[in-house]
Amino acid sequence: QAPLVESGGGLVQPGGSLRLSCAASGSIFSIYAMGWYRQAPGQQRELVAASTSGGRTTYADSAKGRFTISRDNAKNTVYLQMNSLKPEDTSVYYCNRGSVTYYVNTFSYTGSSVWGQGTQVTVSS
């Protein structure tokens, strides 16, 4: 069984919303930091949002104010709510199980080699 399985992608018009889900298995989900990445054709994979095990969050500038990462540890699931979608949000979205480094007022997320298979999000009229 794959450790991470994404769902919820699809075709949406500009300005629309989607909620992605990532179900985790085979590990103690609640102790891990989780991240959502995306990769467009010909582009590098980039971190969109991340959550610590306790629910603290961080976002890429492109996602701030529009995307929300959340997690339900009882369901071993992390979500990415995406609102006000733009054509430039079109990508394959991946979830990742990683780790964090804490600083005084913030933290940084480091991805691991544990990835889901990805889910396609296409924003187009």
Image (spheres, grey):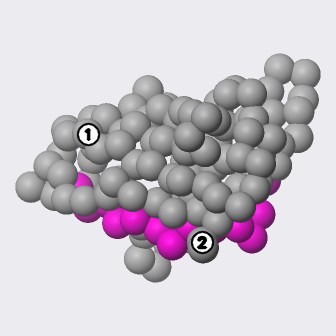
Residue at horizontal 74 percent and vertical 70 percent from the top: 113
- Under circle 1, the secondary element is loop
- Under circle 2, the secondary element is loop
Q: Is residue 59 visible?
A: no
Q: Amino acid at mark 1?
A: Ser
Is residue 112 on the magenta stretch? yes
Q: Which residues are magenta?
A: 108-123
* Depth check, front residue: 52 or 61: 52
Quarter of the image where the C terminus is located: bottom left
Q: Residue 118: image x %, image y %?
A: 47, 68
Of all residues, the one furthest to the left in this rendering is: 125
On screen, 16 above or below 24? Answer: above
Give the residue at mark 2. Answer: 2
Q: Quarter of the image holding residue 87?
A: bottom left
Q: Is residue 82 visible?
A: yes
Q: Quarter of the image holding residue 101?
A: top right
Marking on residue 72: none
Query: Secondary structure of the magenta portion, mostly?
Result: strand
Give the residue at mark 1. Answer: 17
Q: Amino acid at mark 2?
A: Ala
Q: Residue 78: image x %, image y %?
A: 55, 43
Residue at horizontal 39 percent and vertical 58 percent from the top: 7
Is residue 53 on the magenta stretch? no
* Depth check, front residue: 76 or 91: 76
- Between disc 1 and disc 2, whose residue precedes? 2
* Depth check, front residue: 86 or 121: 121
* Depth check, front residue: 32 or 69: 32
Quarter of the image where the N terminus is located: bottom right
Q: Residue 57: image x %, image y %?
A: 65, 30
Residue at horizontal 82 percent and vertical 49 percent from the top: 99
On screen, 83 above or below 1? Answer: above
